[in-house]
Image (cartoon, grey):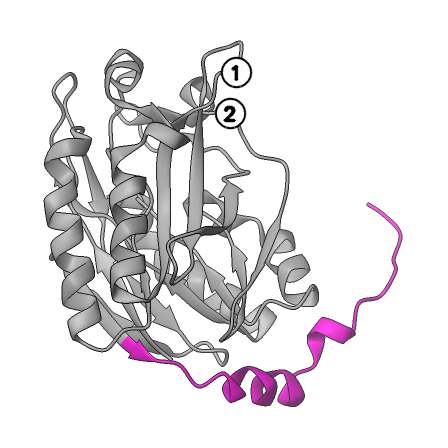
Amino acid sequence: MRVGLIQLTVSDDPAANLPGTLALVRQAVAGGAGFVLTPECTNALSSSRDHQRKVLQAEDQDLTLAALRAEAASAGIWLLVGSLGIVTGDADGRFANRSFLVAPDGTIAARYDKIHMFDVNVSETEVYRESAGYRPGNKAILARTDFATLGMTVCYDIRFPDLYRRLAQGGAQILTVPAAFNHVTGAAHWEALLRARAIETGCYVLAPAQTGFHPETAGKGRRTHGHSLVIDPWGEIVADGGTDPGVAFADLDLAAVARARARIPSLTHDREFTGP
C-alpha cells in the first residue's frame, strides 16, 4: 500500500482552504497513493471561539467533509480526513475535534473524537485551552479496512502511550496521528514521541501535519511544526514532509509489523503490579 500524507497551512476560513486541500489529494492520487491522509484541523485552524461559531458546521453540513468524501469516491481511495472542527449541538456549545476515515465508495467507515485536550502553557505568552472550545471524546476506535486495521488518534493523544498500546493489542497495525503540532513543542518532542509509539507497539505510525504560519481573522495566528512523518514498526523514519505544504509518500510493507513484534513481543508481556 502506498500512502500519501498531505501537509497543509490552513487559515481560519474553511471555504478558502478547501481548493488547496483537494489539489493535494489529487496530487497524492496521481503519485499512486491508495490511502491519503490529511492533518488535524483540515477545515480551519482558529483560536477564536466566536469565529469558530461563525464558520464551523455540523457533520452533515460540513463542506470540507462533503467534498473530500466525493473526492475519495471519485478516485476510489481510502481517505483519512485527519480532523475537522464539527458543531455538536452539545448544551455547552463546544465542538468536536473529529477524525473521519472515508472508504473508497465515499461512505464514512469510522469516526474518532479526539480524547486528550491540548490544555497547556507553552510559555508565558503562548497558552492553549482546547477544552474551552472542544469537548473530549471518550472512546478509542479501531477501523478495519481491506488493507490493514487502523488505530485512530489525533495530535495531543500522542503523549498518552496507554491509548496506543490498547489499540495495538486490539489489533491495530497502523496508527494514525494527524496533527497541528505547536512549533515549539514540535521541535522538541514530535519525532521522539512518534518513534516511541511505533517502537512500543510494532505499528506503522502515519502522522500528517499542519505547517508554518496560520493567519487568523480574529487573533494573532499561530505556527505549527510541519514534518509529516511515516515511521515503520522498528521506529525508523520512512518519510518526512519537511516544512512546506505538499505530499509525502511512503510504501508500507505490513509484513514488517509481524516481523517487529516477533523480534520484540512486548505487547504480550504485560504483568500485574502494585503501587504507587
Q: Which residue is mark 1?
A: 90
Mark 1 against mark 2, which lies toward the viewer? Answer: 1
Question: Residue 260, relative to residue 136: is it above or below?
Answer: below
Residue 4 part of the magenta segment: no
Q: Cβ–Cβ below 8 Å for labels 1 and 2?
A: yes
> In the rendered structure, which amino acid carries the disc numbered 1?
Asp
Task: Count residues near mark 2 (Cα–Cα under 10 Å), then give few for <14, some for 14-19, many for 20+.
Answer: many
**Residue at image x 30%, y 77%?**
250
Q: Is residue 227 visible?
A: no
Left or right, residue 173 beside residue 251: right
Along the viewing direction, whichever of 80 and 41 lies nearer the viewer: 80
- Magenta span contains residue 260: yes
Q: Which residue occupies 44% across, 67% down?
A: 205
**Which amino acid lies under the numbered mark 2 shown in the image of this protein?**
Arg
> Could you tell me residue 101's position as x and y percent?
44, 53
User: Helix or strand or loop: what does disc 2 sit on?
Assistant: loop
Q: Horizontal placement of 27 versus 90: left or right? A: left
Q: Which residues are magenta?
A: 250-276
Q: Is residue 273 above or below residue 149?
A: above
